[in-house]
Image: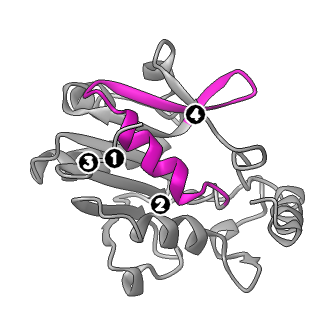
């Protein structure tokens, strides 16, 4: 696989979820001594993306020490599509040729996987895959920015990935912390050293 070319590629971390199924404040929940959101944020901050944008709420754990440009969600009840629109608009304004969309509640995705997505990017789209499904992190070229900004409701960009190529995530890395039992599983996976 080619060396990753991060030039002109922004990363967008969606970190404004309400955590309803978790019982609230899931991004601030402790995962091996750090907030859930910190794991994905630190991993992505360590990669040389052209810009690092994060859409946040008032109660999102602080990302400033990791040098993220934080973009406030303009309504605390806005759906995920609004977070996407805000972040993609920032990437467009920065002149990005692509944007990697990642979720703050997916704490186990390794840096090598994010770099592999950039390496395999042909300017169009590429998704992560697990269990026969396409999912974030996913990288979209600038030609898709308009469609991403036009999404509505609480659905992400999944419909735009239906026929996209995908790279498989390592087993367990697809874990999305939505419920307390997911947090327990993430702790187990981290302690096992499998990820």
The foreground one among 60 and 109 is 109
Q: Which residue is the site of mark 4? A: 135
The reply to whether discs 3 and 1 touch (Cβ–Cβ < 8 Å) is yes
Residue 177 painted magenta:
no
Query: Which mark is nearer the camera, 3 or 4?
Result: 3
The reply to whether discs 2 and 3 touch (Cβ–Cβ < 8 Å) is no
Question: Could you say which disc has been placed on residue 3 in the image?
Answer: 1
Distance (Cα) linking label 4 and label 2:
24 Å
Q: Which residue is the site of mark 2? A: 76
The foreground one among 180 and 172 is 172
Q: Tell me if 53 is positioned left or right of 186 in this view.
A: left
Q: Tell me if 17 is positioned left or right of 170 in this view.
A: left
Query: Which mark is nearer the camera, 2 or 3?
Result: 3
Residue stretch rendered in magenta on the structure = 108-135
Q: Which residue is the site of mark 3? A: 5
The reply to whether discs 4 and 2 touch (Cβ–Cβ < 8 Å) is no
When the figure is inspected, residue 11 is found, relative to residue 48, above or below; the finding is above
Label 3 or label 4, whichever comes before in sequence order: 3
Query: Which mark is nearer the camera, 4 or 2?
Result: 4
Distance (Cα) linking label 1 and label 2:
39 Å
Residue 115 painted magenta:
yes
Q: Secondary structure at mark 1?
A: loop
Distance (Cα) linking label 1 and label 4:
23 Å
Distance (Cα) linking label 3 and label 1:
6 Å
Q: Quadrant of the N terminus?
A: top left
Q: Secondary structure at mark 4?
A: strand
- Identified at 87% across, 59% down, the residue is 185
When the figure is inspected, residue 125 is found, relative to residue 83, above or below; the finding is above
């Amino acid at each position: 696989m080619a060396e990753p070319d991060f030039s002109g590629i922004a990363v967008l971390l969606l970190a404004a979820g309400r955590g309803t199924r978790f019982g609230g404040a899931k991004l601030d929940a402790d995962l091996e001594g750090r907030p859930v959101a910190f794991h994905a944020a630190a991993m992505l901050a360590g990669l040389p993306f052209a810009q690092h944008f994060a859409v946040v709420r008032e109660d999102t754990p602080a990302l400033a020490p990791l040098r993220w440009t934080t973009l406030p969600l303009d309504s605390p009840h806005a759906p995920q599509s609004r977070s996407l629109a805000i972040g993609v608009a920032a990437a467009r304004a920065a002149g990005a040729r692509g944007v990697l969309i990642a979720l703050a509640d997916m704490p186990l995705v390794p840096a090598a996987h994010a770099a592999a997505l950039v390496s395999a990017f042909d300017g169009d789209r590429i998704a992560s895959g697990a269990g026969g499904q396409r999912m974030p992190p996913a990288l979209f070229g600038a030609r898709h920015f308009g469609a991403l900004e036009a999404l509505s409701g609480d659905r992400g960009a999944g419909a735009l990935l239906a026929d996209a190529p995908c790279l498989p995530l390592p087993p367990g890395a697809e874990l999305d912390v939505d419920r307390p039992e997911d947090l327990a599983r993430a702790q187990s996976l981290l302690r096992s050293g499998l990820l």
